[in-house]
Amino acid sequence: MHQRVLVSADRLCASVAAASVIAKVARDRLMEEYDVLYPGYDLAGNKGYAAPEHRAGIDAIGLSPIHRLSFAPCRNRQQMSLWQDAGAECDRISR
């Protein structure tokens, strides 16, 4: 199927802009739910971005099961066993 790349597509195409807003709202809500499950990273406040508070949480308590190990600050760290029980709750929320 032919595809076309649109740089700044959300400014050029209304459907892309709408999809972007929906995706951001869904991500923000999910981060608020994760903030309850995984306190200490300020996920509700920084929405998962690598803000100073988020990095401080990683330094203080390590990684949670939702951290992307491909993200540079997480790459050489291990996830903490502290969150093993919360992982099942995380799976329940994502379904």
Image: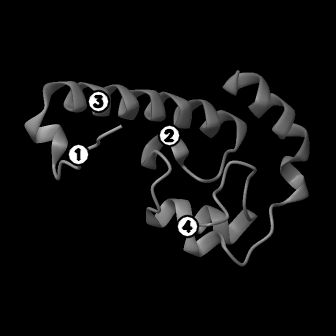
**Residue 40: image location, x then y, percent:** 65, 52
The C terminus, quarter of image:
top right
Sequence-wise first label, 2 or 4: 2
In three-dimensional space, the C-alpha distance between marks 3 and 1, rounded to whole angstroms, equals 21 Å
Per the image, the residue denoted by label 1 is: 4
- The amino acid type found where label 2 is placed reads Ala
| Residue appearing at x 54%, y 37% in the figure | 31
Sequence-wise first label, 4 or 1: 1
In three-dimensional space, the C-alpha distance between marks 4 and 1, rounded to whole angstroms, equals 37 Å
Per the image, the residue denoted by label 4 is: 55
**Residue 62: image location, x then y, percent:** 74, 65
- The amino acid type found where label 1 is placed reads Arg
- The amino acid type found where label 4 is placed reads Arg
Callout 4: few (<14), some (14-19), or many (20+) C-alpha neighbours within 10 Å? some
- Verify CB contact (< 8 Å) between mark 4 and mark 1: no
Q: Is residue 56 left or right of residue 28?
A: right
Secondary structure of residue under mark 4? helix
Per the image, the residue denoted by label 3 is: 21
Q: Quadrant of residue 80?
A: bottom right
Q: Pick the residue in front: 1 or 49.
A: 1
Sequence-wise first label, 3 or 1: 1
Q: Quadrant of residue 78?
A: bottom right
Per the image, the residue denoted by label 2 is: 44
Secondary structure of residue under mark 2? helix
In three-dimensional space, the C-alpha distance between marks 1 and 2, rounded to whole angstroms, equals 35 Å
